[in-house]
Image (spheres, rainbow, N blue to C red):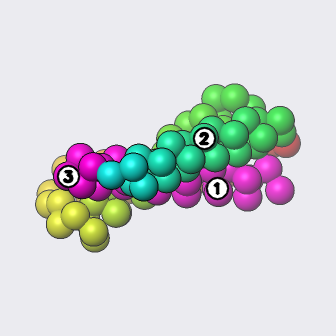
């Protein structure tokens, strides 16, 4: 269950990162409020996951999910460029997240 909570925390991190990009171009109370709510939800869920998952692993996976997701959202929704270096880094990040998950014992 802790890994599911951590995944959800990472998904909320992706949402607030994307909303920050939106807020940079379209300033509104709605976007700002939802951004803050998703930040709080993400951090609270991370804290819940850390009850079972070690700090270093949970934090690395949480930020990794956010980084991978933000990369994908940037490419798909904001037409950001994909270079060989960015793609290789993306693959290495995913490999690291899988490694952390597979080597962590609860």
Q: Nearer the viewer, mark 1 or mark 3?
A: 3
- Mark pair 1, 3: CA separation: 28 Å
Above/below status of 56 relative to 19: above
Which numbered disc covers residue 40?
2
Q: Which mark is residue 7?
A: 1
Q: Residue 25, image x and y in percent?
A: 20, 52
Quadrant, the C terminus: top right
Q: Is residue 58 left or right of residue 60?
A: right
Label 3 secondary element: helix
Position above or below: 59 against 71: above
CA separation in Å, label 1 and label 2: 15 Å
The picture places residue 24, in percent across and down from the top left corner, at 23, 46
Closer to the camera, 25 or 45? 25
Q: Which residue is mark 3?
A: 25
**Going from the N terminus, do you reach mark 1 or mark 2 first?**
1
Task: Report if the CB atoms under discs 1 and 3 are less than 8 Å apart.
Answer: no
Residue 45 in magenta? no
The answer to whether any part of residue 6 appears in the image is: yes
Residue at the bottom extreme, as displayed:
76
Read off the magenta span: 1-27
Of the 4 image quadrants, the one containing the N terminus is bottom right
Decide: few, some or many residues near mark 2? Use Cα within 10 Å; few <14, some 14-19, many ≥20. Answer: some
Residue at image x 34%, y 47%?
Answer: 20
């Amino acid at each position: 269950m802790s890994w599911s909570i951590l995944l959800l925390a990472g998904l909320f991190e992706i949402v607030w990162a994307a909303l920050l990009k939106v807020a940079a171009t379209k300033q509104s109370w709605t976007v700002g409020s939802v951004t803050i709510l998703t930040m709080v939800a993400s951090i609270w869920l991370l804290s819940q996951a850390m009850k079972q998952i070690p700090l270093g692993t949970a934090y690395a996976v949480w930020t990794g999910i956010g980084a991978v997701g933000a990369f994908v959202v940037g490419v798909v929704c904001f037409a950001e460029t994909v270079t060989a270096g960015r793609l290789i880094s993306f693959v290495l990040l995913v490999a690291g997240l899988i490694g952390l998950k597979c080597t962590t014992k609860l």
